[in-house]
Image: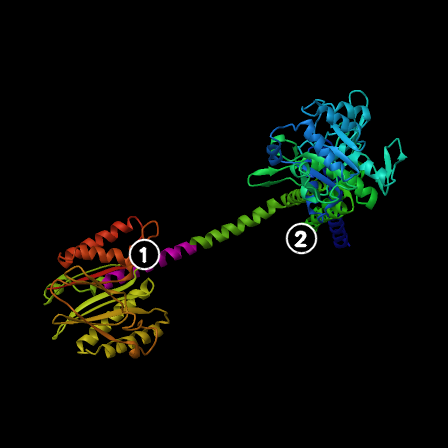
Amino acid sequence: MLARKKFVKILLKKMWKKLKQQLGRQLSIIIIAPSVAGLAIAGNLAGVFRLLEWKMYDRLMLMRPEESVEERIAIVTVSEEDIQHLAQWPMSDRQMAQLIRNIQTQEPTAIGIDLYRDLPVEPGHQELVELFQSTPNLIGIEKVAGVPVPPPPILKELGQVAAADLILDADGKLRRSLIVLGNNQGEFREGLGTKLALIYLQKEGIELEVIDEKKKIYRLGKAVFNPLTGMQGNYFKSETGGYQILLNYRGDLDKFLTISLTDVLENRIPEDFFRDRLVLIGAIAPSLNDFFSTPYSSEKSGRIELTPGVVIHGNIASQILSAALESRLIIQGWERPWGWLWILFWSGYSASLGSISLRHHWAIVAIFLGAGAIVITAYLAFQVGWWIPTVTPLLALTGSAIASIGYIMWDNLKEYALTLEEKVKQRTSQLAQANQEIIALNQKLQAENLRLNAELDIAKQLQQMVLPKPAELEIIEGLEIAGYMEPADEVGGDYYDVLPNDSGIKISIGDVTGHGLESGVLMIMAQTAIRTLHESKQTDPVQFLDILNRTLFHNIERMNSEKNMTLALLDYSNGTLSLSGQHEEIIIVRTDGSLEEIDTIDLGFPLGLDENIADFVAEKKISLHSGDVVVLYTDGITEAENTEGVHYGLARLCELVRENRQLPPEEIRQKVVKDVRQHIGSQKVFDDLTLVIIKQK
């Protein structure tokens, strides 16, 4: 009975602990999601993120399908070439009158002059005034905001004036159409693009209809216009004066019919080019500085490509015409409350997934997919005319994910800390036991290292013991010989020997692969076998190397080793060297300084790799003359590295021997060893250094 009560108590305790964890996670979502969303919304209201949102707007604008050319609008461009043709700027009133007359002959719907003409420019001022009076479809401009620039007086009297003003965002880019604005006298002016579009639509029988005068909602043909009120997008109420809408760009200058001012003045106008169209006259010359940054502005060749003001007025007119006649989309921003709900949704989505991400890794993937869904939704919404928040919900999504994951990690850390002391005790006990095992292992390793070092020392001593002594080399007739062999720290398998016989001298040099005790043992085996074959009067190089190879091959098999050995044999007699076996190149330096490098690759095969190498063995005869020097070496010389990893190299060895060929072999040997040592410097010696210098007496 007591055991059952104890079991129930433990079970209830675990259930309560688990319930507390679940409640804690749910509470974290309830707190984190609105908190992060609130911070994001506050930042949005303060304008902290609107530069990023505008950047996204520009990107969405550029990602749209390309628009067709606007056939209802023609632009007369004033370029630097046109100004040079006129030979003055501003152009004279007579030239302006001629320009308008040439356009008017093709009966355009309306002409908009995006050039300030508030002052007379003689000659021809009276002529231009009379033309203005007789041209009812001609629209001039004035600057309303900032420092005003008045319109042509006669056009103001006739009511044929529009505002040239354009409105920039805080980052200097133009994303809004200024449809109507008021001046200091309480008068309202339509923008140039707006006025021209209304004239065109009036000709088509389309008039402006009021839908909601209080909210300033108007119908124009198939389009309904809602103004920016400071409650949409990323604009404040103080920035939305007059009547503004988001500018649905058609594109840059290439999206309009264009003709140069010079061509119009000289009447080189294509037939019906202006007929029934809106005509805009404006500057594209850089010196006139009528340019603006738009979503289409891009950096090319280190400078920003800007859009001429006349093209922007053309885009505004095109936007109104296309919307009224063809139901082309008018871009609208979400009302702020909808944007706030959008931000809150993604904050809650991310917080929910973040709270389970440590247990379910797929939740991390789902958070990234959520970020993709925000961007894709923004793109699709933009295609149907809605600009919805993108950057702010992305930040809310990221912030909630970080906060919720951080909270769960902190909660887990606190839980872990409760049992940490017990785990530390267990771990301390385990570490103490492991420490004892490590001490024992270290003692064993020290003993093993002492044994290995002793073995390597013995191998080094054995290597040196079997090398020919200087006294043996001095009594050799016909040749002067100097030898040198220095074992590496880990003992390689270098070998050389000089063995006199009745008919001459047998000189051998070889190198066992790898390092360590096995290499040293194989070198001693090779020396013993070569001495044995020499003492048994074996002189045929093929049989000599074949027997030696089989001896080493079977010993290597018995050792269960993968070592092998290169070996060159040189039999000297009466000024002739007979060379066989595969090793490094043999260097011959003649008395006149000429150099010969003899490749041994085709004279043999590495010993110990294959049981039978007789077919690979060949012999090469070399004649020596008095003063000729022969150099034998192992790769420890040519591949000696300095601290920068650069090899000593065969070329350096050859040049040093050639320069010192007149010296005795022992002095040549000393110079080579000294030079190699200087090259190595403080670098560790990784391979045995073996060198034999032979000189014909």
Which is more N-terminal, label 2 or label 1? 2
- Image quadrant in which the N terminus is located: bottom right
Disc 1 is placed on an element classified as loop
Residue assigned mark 2: 361
Against 47, is 594 above or below?
Answer: below
Residue assigned mark 1: 686
Residue 345 image offset from top left, x and y in percent: 77, 43
Give, as a single range, the part of the protein colored magenta.
440-463
Instruction: Give the residue type that dot 1 points to.
Output: Phe
Front-lying residue, 288 or 138 = 138
Residue 534 image offset from top left, x and y in percent: 19, 75
Residue 325 image offset from top left, x and y in percent: 83, 44
Disc 2 is placed on an element classified as loop
Front-lying residue, 697 or 207 = 207
Disc 1 + disc 2, Cβ < 8 Å: no
Residue 609 visible in the displayed image: yes
Q: Residue at x 26, y 72 (%)?
A: 581
Residue 231 visible in the displayed image: no
